[in-house]
């Protein structure tokens, strides 16, 4: 019989992986890895504001991540700075602001390692409920935006001509990334959540023939990484969040160098 805390950890990790995998497919296709890092780094600023204002941390993390995502979208449209420069500035600025803000919370001792690298074994029933609600909402939004997202991924200008509302769809994708980051913060931490989106999706890309297959395979590889990481953490007394990412990385390396495979590159314009 599994201990109660271990059961909660497995359920939390599996739920996050099921959502992060399909979303990670779009992150990979649209080459948004650095964007995901920038939004995830801003999550620590949300944590600091939550402590300063005495409000729910998950709510503040979600709001800050969404705000940063919206700011990024509109600043990229102005094209005054290269995207990678803009992302670098915002990523490190948001992370540093969060660290500095935490220092101003008087009388508070914060375990920053838990927020930076996750503490999945400390997931409570309330955390599990929040992850379930956030994950379900993200899945519903992703399903509703699936076709428009594919259209702008294949060819954004053609999608615009065909009547797809490109900017709202892009903002919807940013909202999804923010929701998943807020939900997954306690599982693998703000510094590693992008890995849980990207690595399973990159692993699945080799074996999938369609976008839908890649989304499902990415979720499956993410679940396997969670289970293997938690097992490895217990077997070798290693930090659980990083162990999950290491498990995902090992799967990518092993499967990427297996002979054969389909090597599908992503959705293509017809």
Image (tube, rainbow, N blue to C red):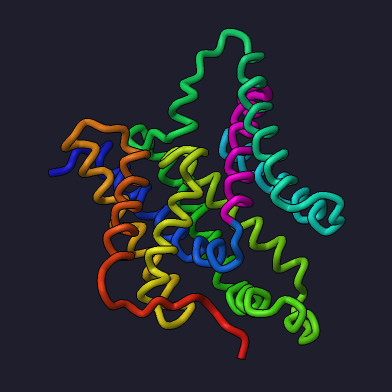
Residue sitting at x 26%, y 51%: 227
Residue sitting at x 68%, y 42%: 88
Q: How far across and down, in percent of the image, does residue 55 sit? A: 63, 30
Q: Is residue 140 visible?
A: no
Towards the viewer: 203 or 230: 203
| Relative side of 115 to 88, left or right | left
Kindly indicate the quadrant of the structure image that contains residue 251: bottom left
Q: How far across and down, in percent of the image, does residue 151 sit? A: 65, 80
Most extreme residue toward the top is 107
Residue sitting at x 38%, y 68%: 204
Towards the viewer: 265 or 182: 265
> Which residues make up the magenta segment?
33-55
Towards the viewer: 69 or 209: 209
* As drawn, 233 above or below 264: above
Q: How far across and down, in percent of the image, does residue 195 sit? A: 45, 49
Q: How far across and down, in percent of the image, does residue 246 sit? A: 33, 45
Kindly indicate the quadrant of the structure image that contains residue 145: bottom right
* As drawn, 91 above or below 96: below
Most extreme residue toward the bottom is 270
Q: Is residue 41 magenta?
A: yes
* As drawn, 223 above or below 168: above
Q: Is residue 46 visible?
A: yes
Q: Main secondary structure of the magenta part?
A: helix
């Amino acid at each position: 019989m599994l201990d109660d805390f271990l059961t909660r950890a497995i359920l939390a990790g599996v739920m996050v992986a099921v959502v992060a995998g399909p979303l990670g497919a779009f992150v990979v296709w649209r080459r948004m890895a650095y964007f995901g890092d920038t939004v995830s780094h801003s999550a620590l600023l949300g944590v600091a504001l939550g402590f300063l204002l005495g409000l729910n941390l998950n709510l503040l993390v979600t709001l800050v991540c969404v705000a940063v995502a919206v700011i990024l979208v509109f600043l990229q449209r102005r094209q005054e700075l290269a995207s990678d420069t803009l992302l670098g500035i915002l990523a490190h600025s948001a992370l540093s602001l969060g660290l500095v803000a935490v220092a101003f919370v008087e009388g508070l001792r914060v375990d920053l390692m838990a927020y930076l690298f996750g503490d999945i074994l400390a997931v409570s029933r309330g955390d599990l409920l929040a992850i379930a609600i956030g994950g379900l909402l993200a899945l519903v939004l992703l399903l509703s935006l699936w076709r428009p997202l594919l259209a702008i991924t294949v060819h954004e200008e053609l999608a615009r001509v065909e009547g797809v509302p490109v900017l709202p769809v892009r903002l919807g994708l940013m909202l999804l990334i923010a929701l998943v980051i807020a939900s997954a913060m306690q599982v693998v931490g703000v510094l590693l959540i992008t890995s849980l989106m990207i690595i399973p999706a990159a692993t699945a890309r080799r074996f999938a023939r369609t976008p839908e297959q890649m989304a499902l395979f990415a979720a499956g590889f993410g679940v396997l990484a969670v289970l293997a990481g938690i097992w490895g953490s217990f077997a070798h007394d290693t930090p659980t969040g990083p162990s999950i990412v290491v498990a995902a990385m090992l799967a990518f390396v092993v499967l990427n160098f297996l002979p054969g495979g389909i090597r599908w590159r992503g959705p293509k314009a017809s």
